[in-house]
Structures are given as structure tokens and as C-alpha cells.
Image: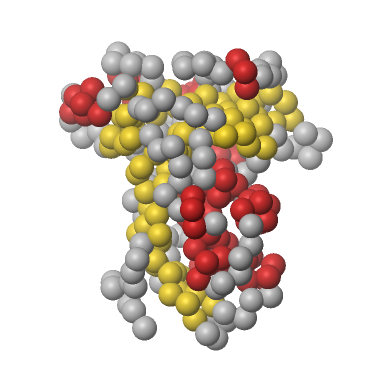
């Protein structure tokens, strides 16, 4: 059996996403917010390693600080898939966490999606994409888009997805030193919840805004500092509930030049947009 320091190969990638805009257009009676957004997949990824077990146990060998094993989204995804299908196999899970937590990049959701996709293959279950998306929604509203595997216009709570084609782009992504609570932001009475809905036919580059940004910036002023600097160089935006911010550039060289000019001590990365999830053909 491989150890936590020497996980089995190959790695299963779990890419990040950016919300090119995020509008809150209403609220359901159960409290869930109704959204419109465009999800853009990027090539910055967590890496997950999996090994099949014959005893039915699910073991996470790389727990995140402060997160009990049974609350980790990778463990929960494996347990949900096993319970849903009645599969008697188990899995050892290793997570190489490269995406920041609480950053709005969807890292935890992407990790869960990759576990569902990979174990569907490793356990020989053969579930179709739509079934995996339905399972993913039980884990979180952002999970289905990673199983869907395409850049998408999303509505509902984020689960109603329509594939869209996006032009090539490179992104400067900055990671302010904060961990933002999504629940806290959506619970704020200051959050705008009545942005007019748009139609997919109205989509165009630069459209929209992020309704969560004023609430995030008010509670985490450093996010506003990062946005202010980025907007001197491009169309700086908040992704998800933050705190990561980003700007798009037409080519890698332009993005690298802006990233190199960032203030000393600021963290982040440059990433290219993806047309499809790296595991799209695995389902």
C-alpha cells in the first residue's frame, strides 16, 4: 500500500474555475439564492491520487487542517458514490492541495467532482454524466459544472448549465491573505438579490459584475486593495465569493508581465483558460 508521501499514480486533475460574472437574481423559499454566472475552467489544478480497496473502507491520507475526514469533500464524494450505487469497493485518497481554500476558485467542489469521475471509472460503475452531476449537486452547487466539463452559462443555484464557447485567454489570479466564508457573504443583509436576469443570447465579453463583491470588500478590505491594483492593469473582478481576484488578458505574455509587476509579497498565479475539463472524456 502506498504511503501519504508516496501516493500511487497517476494523478487525477481537479481544475479551478473563475466566475466571469456572478449575478444574484432572486431567492427561493428555502433560502437558496438564484444565480446567473459564467463558469470558466482554468488550467490551475489540485491533484488527486486514488487506490482501490477491496474492503469497502474509504481512507483520506492527507487531511486538511481543521477538517475532520468525514467532512472533507473528497471523502464525502467517495462515500456518497459508494452508498448510491451499493458498491462494495473502497478507496484510499490522497490530495495534493494547490488551490487556496476560501478563494472562490471552486477547489473543494472540483476535488469532489474529480473523485466522483475517477471512482466511477476505477470501480467500474459506468454511471452517465447526468447521474454524476445529480450526485455532485448533493455535495455543493459548484460540483456539477466540473462534472459537466465545459465552460458554461449557469442558472438556478448553479446547476442548470448550458455549454458556451469562450475565446482563448490567460488570467492573472491574485490570492489575498484571507479565507472568505461563502455562507457569511450570502447571509449578509447588504447583498443585492434582485439583479435583472439576462438571456444567454446577451452574453458578450466584459458583461456583468459580481454582486458579492461589495459585501466581500466591506468585510475584507484587503480584497478591495488587490482589486484596486489589478484594475490599474485590466478588468479586475472577484471570482465566486472570493477572496481571489482576477483579470483576463489576450495572451500569456501580457498576463505574465502584469503578474510580474505585482507588489512584493502578493501571491497568485497565471493560468490559461480551458475549453474542456481534463477528464471530460473519462465519463
Q: Is residue 51 visible?
A: yes
The residue located at (75%, 37%) in the rendering is 31
In the displayed orientation, state which residue is furthest to the front: 281
Q: Is residue 271 left or right of residue 104?
A: left
The residue located at (50%, 71%) in the rendering is 122
Q: Nearer the viewer, residue 22 or 262?
A: 22
Residue 9 appears in which quarter of the rendering?
A: bottom left
Residue 66 appears in which quarter of the rendering?
A: bottom left
x, y percentage for residue 240?
A: 51, 33
Q: Is residue 221 visible?
A: no
In the displayed orientation, state which residue is furthest to the bottom: 55
Residue 85 appears in which quarter of the rendering?
A: bottom right
x, y percentage for residue 6?
A: 28, 73
- Looking at the image, how many numbered discs can be counted on the residues? 0
Name the colouring of the figure: secondary structure
Where the C terminus falls, by quadrant? Answer: bottom right
Q: Is residue 147 left or right of residue 156?
A: left
Where the N terminus falls, by quadrant? Answer: bottom left
Q: Is residue 183 left or right of residue 178?
A: right
x, y percentage for residue 20?
A: 48, 26
Q: Please, is residue 11 above or below residue 274 in the view?
A: below
Q: Is residue 268 left or right of residue 221?
A: left
Q: Nearer the viewer, residue 1 or 60?
A: 1
x, y percentage for residue 172?
A: 31, 29
Q: Please, is residue 269 above or below residue 92 in the view?
A: above
The residue located at (33%, 16%) in the rendering is 234
Q: Nearer the viewer, residue 116 or 246?
A: 116
Amino acid at each position: 500500500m502506498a504511503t501519504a508521501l508516496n501516493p500511487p499514480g497517476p494523478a487525477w486533475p481537479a481544475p479551478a474555475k473563475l466566475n466571469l460574472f456572478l449575478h444574484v437574481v432572486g431567492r427561493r423559499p428555502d433560502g437558496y439564492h438564484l444565480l446567473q454566472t459564467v463558469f470558466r475552467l482554468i488550467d490551475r489544478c489540485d491533484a488527486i491520487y486514488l487506490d482501490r480497496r477491496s474492503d469497502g473502507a474509504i481512507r483520506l491520507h492527507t487531511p486538511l487542517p481543521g477538517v475532520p475526514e468525514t467532512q472533507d469533500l473528497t471523502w464525502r464524494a467517495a462515500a456518497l458514490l459508494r452508498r448510491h450505487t451499493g458498491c462494495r469497493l473502497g478507496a484510499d485518497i490522497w490530495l495534493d492541495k494547490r488551490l487556496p481554500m476560501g478563494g472562490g476558485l471552486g477547489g473543494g467542489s472540483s476535488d469532489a467532482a474529480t473523485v466522483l469521475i475517477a471512482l466511477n471509472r476505477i470501480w467500474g460503475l459506468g454511471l452517465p454524466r447526468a447521474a454524476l452531476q445529480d450526485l455532485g449537486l448533493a455535495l455543493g452547487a459548484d460540483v456539477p459544472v466540473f462534472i459537466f466539463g465545459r465552460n458554461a452559462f449557469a442558472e438556478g443555484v448553479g446547476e442548470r448549465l448550458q455549454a458556451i464557447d469562450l475565446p482563448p485567454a490567460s488570467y492573472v489570479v491574485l490570492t489575498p491573505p484571507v479565507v472568505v466564508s461563502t455562507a457569511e457573504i450570502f447571509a449578509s443583509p447588504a447583498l443585492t438579490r434582485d439583479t435583472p436576469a439576462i438571456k444567454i443570447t446577451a452574453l458578450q465579453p466584459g458583461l456583468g459584475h459580481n454582486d458579492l463583491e461589495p459585501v466581500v470588500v466591506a468585510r475584507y478590505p484587503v480584497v478591495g486593495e488587490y482589486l484596486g491594483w489589478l484594475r490599474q492593469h485590466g478588468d479586475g473582478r472577484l471570482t465566486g465569493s472570493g477572496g481571489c481576484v482576477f483579470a483576463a488578458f489576450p495572451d500569456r505574455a501580457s498576463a505574465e508581465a502584469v503578474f510580474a509587476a505585482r507588489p512584493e509579497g502578493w501571491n497568485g498565479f497565471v493560468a490559461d483558460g480551458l475549453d474542456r475539463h481534463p477528464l471530460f472524456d473519462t465519463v
